[in-house]
Amino acid sequence: MVKSMVNNRIKAFSLMEAAVCMLIVGVFTAMCANAFTKRHVTYQEADGHGRYECYINGGVLAQRYVENNSPRSITSNSCVFRPPRYAKYFLINAIGGGSASGAGTFESLFYSSFSDPITITPGAAGGGDTVLTVDGSELRRVPGGGGQIVVTNSSATTVTDCTIQQLPVDGVTYTCGSSLSCSQSGTNIIVNYCHSNGTGGMESTTLPLEYVRTNRMGTLPGGKITYKDLSGYTERGFSATDAVSQIKTCTGADCYPVKYQMTLTFETTQNQDSQMEAYLEALDVHDGIAAVNPGALNKAGGVVILW
């Protein structure tokens, strides 16, 4: 019996030996934790930048990915952009189809994250709209057609027409026996409106043209902007920017008097140069979508997405 117990004691691990083994295993496991828990990061994911193009070349839909300066074309009946999961942002640049009179409209959209596939339909030559959809819902429609209307310059001499409308205050539209008017004078807009009812209620105010442009209510087709009287808000301590926001959203007692509205028309021109062409030139892109000059006169539109 004694001999058997001695043999068993010799073949077994001591408590100290077991503790040392467990310590070694624990250290090894801790050192390898990252390798066990994190997915493998490829070279492509580490780089994290690329470009997607969708355009029409010779009447045929074309799309390609360009990553690490390596283009990969995809043959398909439709353009579908599938966002890389490793991308940190997306910049979508789209242009509508150009018509005989002007280039398509160019727009850029920034997204900090995007996971759903985007289906793209480039605007047809002749002025078709370029359309982007996600899950069947329209994400963006970029106009083609007559070309993007642009103000020829930002100087004060570009205003060609100004109309003014008296607005009701507490349900009453003031009349003061004089004609309302607005007109340009140098770098300013001179506004004559009814400040109160009755003869002598006419008031004249001078607004810098740049102030009117910056604090406009909206933009209308044909190079026009709308502007509303902000004095009822600025006299109460609102900034011009806050006044514009308040006028657009206020209801009932939260609204202060707005006595007139102006519509200003600027000298404009049809933009006949594709802004997408200039954008791609700045990116130093000369093949693929750049070779077909999307959105130019009588050219189909297209989309470039960067990440």
Image (cartoon, helix red, strand yellow):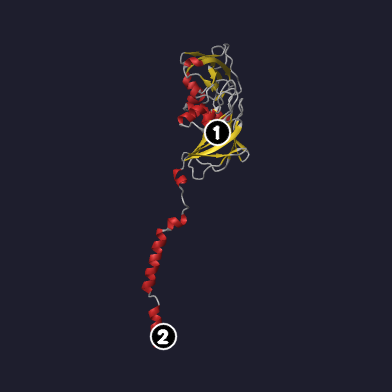
Residue linked to disc 2: 4
39 vs 72: above or below:
below
Residue linked to disc 1: 303
Asked if residue 266 shows in the view, the reply is no
Q: Which amino acid does label 1 sit on?
A: Val
- Residue shown at the point (61%, 30%) measured from the top left: 59
140 vs 201: above or below:
below
Image coords of residue 125 (percent x, y) = 60, 27
Image quadrant of residue 260? top right
SS of the residue at dot 2?
Answer: helix
| Figure quadrant of the N terminus | bottom left
224 vs 15: above or below:
above
Residue in the foreground of this view, choosing between 140 and 203: 140
Image quadrant of residue 255? top right
- Residue shown at the point (39%, 71%) measured from the top left: 18
- Residue shown at the point (44%, 43%) measured from the top left: 47
Q: Gap between marks 2 and 1, in whole Å? A: 84 Å
Residue in the foreground of this view, choosing between 257 and 46: 46
Asked if residue 298 shows in the view, the reply is yes
